[in-house]
Image (cartoon, rainbow, N blue to C red):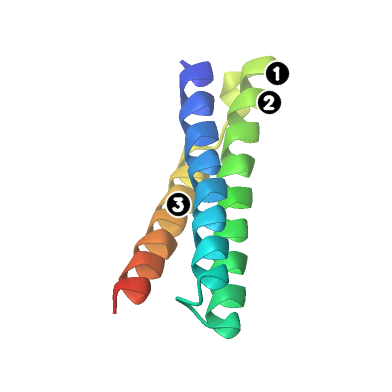
């Protein structure tokens, strides 16, 4: 089961890599300013890193002991990452 959660976190992490590519293309097409690009790119990098840390927690828990996994902490981190992503897309639309 932990492998499945790890796979989902990996997929979400890759989605943010794709989002970085999208933001880079928008910048090169002059659809967003360099300041907007810098902020958005940094946010997507941080989101990717956040999901990678969740993925790694599941991988390590699977290897060591599932009892060492702090689900409450991971849920809090997941919620923060999702809220940040929602804010990002809302700010891009406006």
Residue 13 sits in which quadrant?
A: top right
- From mark 3 to mark 2, how far is it between C-alphas? 19 Å
**Picture residue at 53% right of the left edge, 17% below the top:** 3
- From mark 1 to mark 2, how far is it between C-alphas? 6 Å
Q: Within 10 angstroms of label 3, few (less than 14), some, or many (20 or more) residues? A: few
N-terminal-most mark, 1 or 3: 1
* Number of marks in the rendered image: 3
Q: Which residue is mark 1?
A: 64
Element type where label 1 sits in the image:
loop
Element type where label 2 sits in the image:
helix
Quarter of the image with the C terminus is: bottom left
Q: Which residue is mark 3?
A: 76
**Picture residue at 41% right of the left edge, 68% below the top:** 88
Q: Within 10 angstroms of label 2, few (less than 14), some, or many (20 or more) residues? A: some
Residue 30 picture location, percent across and down:
51, 77
Residue 52 is marked as none
Left or right position of 72 against 60: left
Left or right position of 63 against 30: right
Q: Which residue is mark 2?
A: 60
Residue contact between numbered discs 1 and 2, judged by CB atoms under 8 Å: yes
Residue 15 picture location, percent across and down:
48, 43
- From mark 1 to mark 3, how far is it between C-alphas? 22 Å
Residue contact between numbered discs 3 and 2, judged by CB atoms under 8 Å: no
Image height of 68 relative to 91, above or below: above
Extreme front residue here? 29
Residue 71 picture location, percent across and down:
48, 37
Residue 66 picture location, percent across and down:
58, 20
């Amino acid at each position: 089961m932990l492998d499945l959660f790890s796979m989902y976190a990996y997929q979400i992490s890759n989605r943010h890599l794709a989002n970085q590519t999208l933001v880079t293309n928008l910048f090169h097409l002059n659809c967003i300013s360099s300041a907007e690009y810098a902020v958005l790119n940094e946010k997507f990098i941080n989101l990717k890193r956040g999901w990678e840390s969740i993925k790694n927690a599941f991988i390590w828990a699977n290897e060591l002991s599932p009892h060492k996994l702090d689900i409450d902490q991971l849920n809090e981190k997941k919620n923060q990452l999702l809220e940040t992503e929602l804010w990002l897309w809302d700010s891009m639309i406006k």
